[in-house]
Image (cartoon, rainbow, N blue to C red):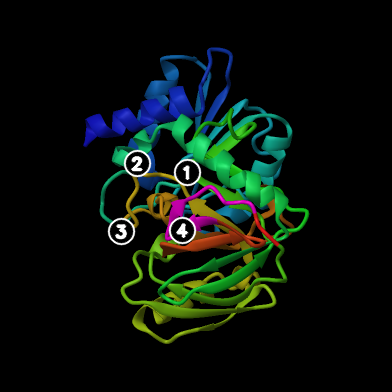
Amino acid sequence: MMEDMKRGAEIVIRTWVHVEARDNVLIVTTKEHMDEANMLLHCAKEITNSVAVMMLEETGRHVGVYFDENENVFDSYTAIIAATDYSLVTTKAARRAIKKRKKFMSLPLSTNDGRSMLAYDFMTMDTKKSKMMANVIMKYLKQSKYVRIQTEAGTDLKVYKERRKPGFFNGVVKDGKGYSSASIEVYVPIEETKTQGIMMLDGSLGYIGKATEKTKIVFENGKIVDIEATPTGKRLKEYMEGYCDPRIYIAGELGIGLNSKSHCDGNCYIEDESSYGTFHIGLGRNIALGGKQNANGHFDLVCHEPNIYTDNRQIIDKGNIIVPEPVVY
């Protein structure tokens, strides 16, 4: 696995962040991920002598709170790699770093199978191919006021995104205008009070693994109001209650996976939400994505094979990107 980890670290440092000799690099990590941090450190030091590691004491889902309370923590660095279990890209410190035109790489390393995320094959996805797919989808998202998502499993959701700009992640910070995530996807920060309908959860539950059975989740006025009491639903409800923040129930993001080398098996949070042929609803914090919602955290619920419509144009058919035909009235 060490060789695969090295391959992944090289991709992060050289292709995604594109570390240069003039960069002052900070790797943010925890003791659980020191192997990955040391691999990233070694790869970065082959390019620049200015590399530091920040070790966090908080390793749980509330790790982002520190970076909300200390917005200027990244001011001394030109490139930040957030190699922790949980995503930091939606925090205030990340938003500040991005506004200051620093390179910011969100690298959530959470896995459920004991493997390092750096060793996963999805890290090798062709970034140019994912950018091309993203541009097709974003063209129609930019023109729409709302998006409707339906699946054969029973999902029927309507999310609104008027005056909200879509974006995409493909790992490459340059393509993301200074920041990116290991999650290869198109995203849009949806309006926080308007999501309506039913999600039949049949993919994964963010950090806590695979949905073992289809579970009905009801959204009203932008937030979850009911979770079906299946084993999956009970596990999800208990997890969400652990945030101790009612804002975690608010839908703040629509994401569409673009990584054809990913599999939504519940083993890796980032791989699940990146998988081509899936969509996800991001719950909680969305401020760094362009939204207005703060919260104690952010995580995603993933579903398979959506039909997705921007206003009245279909752009995804059972998970596959299509080119919409002109609408005839």
Among the two numbered marks 4 and 2 on one chain, the one whose residue lies closer to the N terminus = 2
- Name the one closer to the observer, 149 or 252: 149
Q: Is residue 132 left or right of residue 177?
A: left
User: Image point 54% across, 30% down: which residue?
Assistant: 26
Q: Which mark is residue 265?
A: 3
Going by the numbered disc 1, the residue's amino acid type is Ile
Which residue in the protein does label 1 denote? 184
- Name the one closer to the observer, 316 or 108: 316
**Which residue, as the protein is rendered here, is positioned at the far bottom?**
229
Going by the numbered disc 4, the residue's amino acid type is Asp
10 Å neighbourhood of mark 4: few (<14), some, or many (≥20)?
Answer: some
Above or below, 42 against 198 in this view is: above
Q: Secondary structure at mark 2?
A: helix
User: Alpha carbon of mark 4 to alpha carbon of mark 2: how far?
Assistant: 23 Å
Q: Nearer the viewer, mark 4 or mark 1?
A: 4
Determine whether label 4 and label 3 are within 8 Å by CB.
no
Determine whether label 1 and label 2 are within 8 Å by CB.
yes
Q: Is residue 148 left or right of residue 228?
A: right
Residue 216 horizontal/vertical position (percent): 46, 80
- Name the one closer to the observer, 197 or 328: 328
Q: Secondary structure at mark 4?
A: strand
10 Å neighbourhood of mark 3: few (<14), some, or many (≥20)?
Answer: some
Residue 129 horizontal/vertical position (percent): 45, 34
Which residue in the protein does label 4 denote? 317
User: Alpha carbon of mark 2 to alpha carbon of mark 3: how far?
Assistant: 13 Å
Which residue in the protein does label 2 denote? 122
User: Image point 30% across, 59% down: which residue?
Assistant: 265
Q: Which quarter of the image is occupied by the C terminus?
A: bottom right
